[in-house]
Image: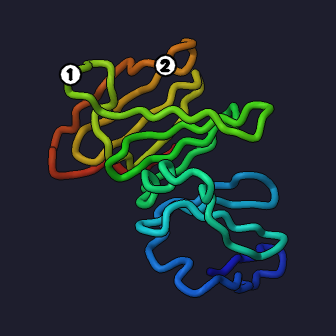
Amino acid sequence: MFLFDPKTKKFTSIPQNKNQITSPINAITKLNSDEILLGTSGNGLLVVDLKMQKISNFLSHHQLLKDKTKITRSLKKDSKDNLWIGTDGYGLLEIQYPNSKEPIVRNYINNAQLSSSLSGNAIYVIAEDEASNMWIGTAWNGVSVLDKKNKTPNIIEIIEPPIKEESISEYIN
């Protein structure tokens, strides 16, 4: 893995352990000023410490979450600093970090019996609008809009794609 320094216009290599990143990187987001998060297609979520130039597993102490995020398609930090993780088959994860070290995790998934559930479980795009609603683009199942202003989040709209064979991609204007 290489980091680009825009000031020097040079790349530097970040050393990694053998077999640490063996699959494609699907998503990258900034965790804080010293760390970035990588979502991969098989190696799960990896944290890159920019100061120490070290790569580690983000969910090393949470085996269930580690299993659900082995294939991560999208990542998003929202305006409240919550982390959203789009998985390939396990829906959408929201991780909140209150004043304690233990995060609060919510898992939004598709349930065919509930009209208020996500439209699909393969999440390719996550975006936040000005009203703090989360727009969730799925593969083959349209777009869901999650209303975050209510204390109990619920799906407020599902937009069906015109063509079932294509997935929603990200475009930010």
- Side (left or right) of 87 relative to 59: left
Residue at left offset 59%, top offset 26%: 130
Q: Residues within 10 Å of mark 1 (few under 14, many from 20)?
A: few
Q: Is residue 88 above or below residue 152?
A: below
**In the rendering, which numbered label is found on residue 113?**
1
Along the viewing direction, whichever of 115 and 8 lies nearer the viewer = 115
Q: Looking at the picture, which amino acid does disc 1 mark? A: Gln
Above/below status of 24 relative to 144: below
What SS does tag 2 mark? loop
Q: In the displayed structure, would residue 86 be above or below residue 108?
A: below
x 28%, y 48%: residue: 139
Residue at 38%, 18% (x, y): give it.
Answer: 156
Q: Mark 1 to mark 2: distance in Å? A: 18 Å
Q: Nearer the viewer, residue 60 or 45?
A: 60
Mark 1, mark 2: which one is toward the viewer? 1
Q: Position of residue 52 (x, y in %)?
A: 82, 73
SS under mark 1: loop
Query: Is 142 left, or right, of 123 in this rendering?
Result: left
Q: Position of residue 171 (x, y in %)?
A: 45, 48
**Quick check: can you spot residue 78?**
no
Q: Say which residue label 2 marks.
A: 153
